[in-house]
Image (cartoon, rainbow, N blue to C red):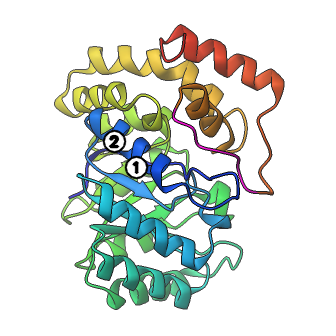
Amino acid sequence: MFEGVIPALVTPFAKDSSIDAEKFRDIVSFVEDGGVSGILACGTTGESATLSIAEHKELIDLSVDCAKVPVVAGTGSNNTAEAVDLTKYAADAGADAALIISPYYNKTNNAGLLAHFNAIADSADIPIILYNVPSRTGQNVPLEVISELAKVENIVGIKEASGSVENVSRILEETVDEDFGVLSGEDGLAFPITALGGAGVISVVANLLPEMMVQMVDASKKGDFAIARELHYKMAPLIRVLFSETNPIPVKRAIDLMGLASGDMRLPLAPISKENETVLTDVLRSMGCIE
């Protein structure tokens, strides 16, 4: 099972807008030094929506080459054939799992969701982690669909970012007899979700504070809730400012401020506002991330 803290890594870009492989390696080394249990490349935080297919594959290859921890590759799409192609590529490249977002924009019915995920799972001999993020896709993956997919041998878990702890609790309840892990897709809910029995978190904050997030998740999973609660509230101001604008706008600026240059974002994302950058800088300074 994939568990613990898996940073959803930013994708650093060079001045010519190409992927900056050297900076990506630096970021991977930084989070690995913080004790993370895996990394996610080509996720939303990695600006997957503006990566070409060739760049997706380039980043998967780079991740497999440089990471010492398991690699989860974001290979989802609203085009099933494209997701199949990317997932096959990730499996052949040596990725340890694939993260598959539910189809966005199409907003298919339950039969379509089941057919989409099953087609991808059948296409490659690689563990599949589902991704439910209705704020991005416009559609919540229903509990009955998740419960059915949890029975598929190589569908091993879900990144749950619906914002509902009750929804997570129901998923855990309905899949208790399956080898199926629930990972928080939201840093602010990592503590309550792991306390409920969740496997861990796919985290944005772990780009910046990998060690603290690992300590919090480990404490929560062990039942050391006083420690986990303290760390949760210690990270809370940073979590808030990191989501004051669309992810990954604030986290990319934060990484730059910390000296792990990530470069500009690709349009249509624009730089963080001056007001939010001031708050971000103050929070990073108060937490000892920058001087």
- The answer to which of 1 and 12 lies nearer the viewer is 12
Q: How many marks?
A: 2
Indicate the amino acid at tag 1.
Answer: Arg
Place of residue 185 in the rendered image (x, y in percent of width and height, measured from the top left): 47, 48
Instruction: Give the secondary structure at mark 1.
Output: helix
| Above or below 221: residue 7 | below
Place of residue 105 in the rendered image (x, y in percent of width and height, measured from the top left): 71, 74
Is there any visible trace of residue 174 in the rendered image? no
Residue at x 32%, y 64% (from the top left corner): 64
Based on the displayed image, in which of its 4 quarters is residue 272 positioned? top right
Report the Cα–Cα distance between label 2 and label 1. Answer: 6 Å
Q: Are marks 2 and 1 in contact (CB under 8 Å)?
A: yes
| Above or below 82: residue 141 | above
The answer to if 123 sits in the magenta stretch is no
Place of residue 101 in the rendered image (x, y in percent of width and height, measured from the top left): 52, 68
Label 2, residues with CA under 10 Å away: few <14, some 14-19, many ≥20: some
Indicate the amino acid at tag 2.
Answer: Ser
Place of residue 257 in the rendered image (x, y in percent of width and height, measured from the top left): 60, 26
Which residues lie in the magenta part?
260-266
Q: Which residue is mark 2?
A: 29
Is there any visible trace of residue 250 in the rendered image? yes
